[in-house]
Amino acid sequence: MSLRHQPVRTCIGCRSRDDQANLVRWSAVNRSGVTVAEVDHRRQLAGRGAWLHPRPSCVELALKRKAFNRAFRGVVDSQSVEQWLHTLRGTS
C-alpha cells in the first residue's frame, strides 16, 4: 500500500498547519495597476500564494490581521476576500 505525501501549508488566518488539500490558495494578481487577492482554484497562478481555511473564522482573522498584505509583501486589495466571506456565511 502506497501513501502519497500531502504537502502541508499554514493558514494565514488561524496560523495552524494543515494538509494543502484542506486549504484554499490565494494569489496576488495585478488588475489595472492594483494588486488584488484572488482565489486560485486550480493552484496554478504565478507568484506567491497565501493559504486559508474555507471557514468564516479564518477569513475574518486574516482580514483583521491584514495577513494578505503580509503574505504578499505589499498592499493588497482584499475586497474579493470580503465577498468570499459573505458567500461562506450565506449572506449577500
Image: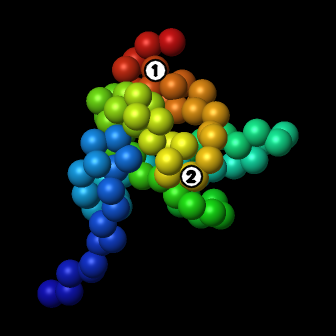
Name the side, left or right, on which 49 lies relative to 74. Answer: left
Asked which quadrant contains residue 48, the reply is bottom right
Percent across and percent down for residue 2 are 20, 86
SS at badge 1: helix
Query: At x 51% / y 12%, what residue is drawn?
Result: 92
How dense is the environment of label 2, judged by Cα within 10 Å: few (below 14), some, or many (20 and up)? some
Nearer to the camera, 66 or 56: 66
Q: Does residue 40 appear anywhere in the picture?
A: no
- The residue at which mark 2 appears reads as 72
Residue that sits furthest to the top in the current view: 92
> Would you place residue 14 above or below residue 19 in this image?
above
Query: At x 28% / y 48%, what residue is drawn?
Result: 15
Count of labels shown? Answer: 2
For the residues carrying marks 2 and 1, which lies nearer the camera in this image? Answer: 2
Amino acid type at mark 1: His
Query: At x 58% / y 33%, what residue is drawn?
Result: 78
How dense is the environment of label 1, judged by Cα within 10 Å: few (below 14), some, or many (20 and up)? few
Query: At x 64% / y 34%, what residue is drawn?
Result: 77
Asked which quadrant contains residue 46, the reply is bottom right
Name the side, left or right, on which 31 lies relative to 87. Answer: right
> Would you place residue 52 above or below residue 83 in this image?
below
- The residue at which mark 1 appears reads as 86
Q: Does residue 58 appear anywhere in the picture?
A: yes
Percent across and percent down for residue 60 are 37, 28
Residue that sits furthest to the bottom in the current view: 1
Nearer to the camera, 54 or 37: 37
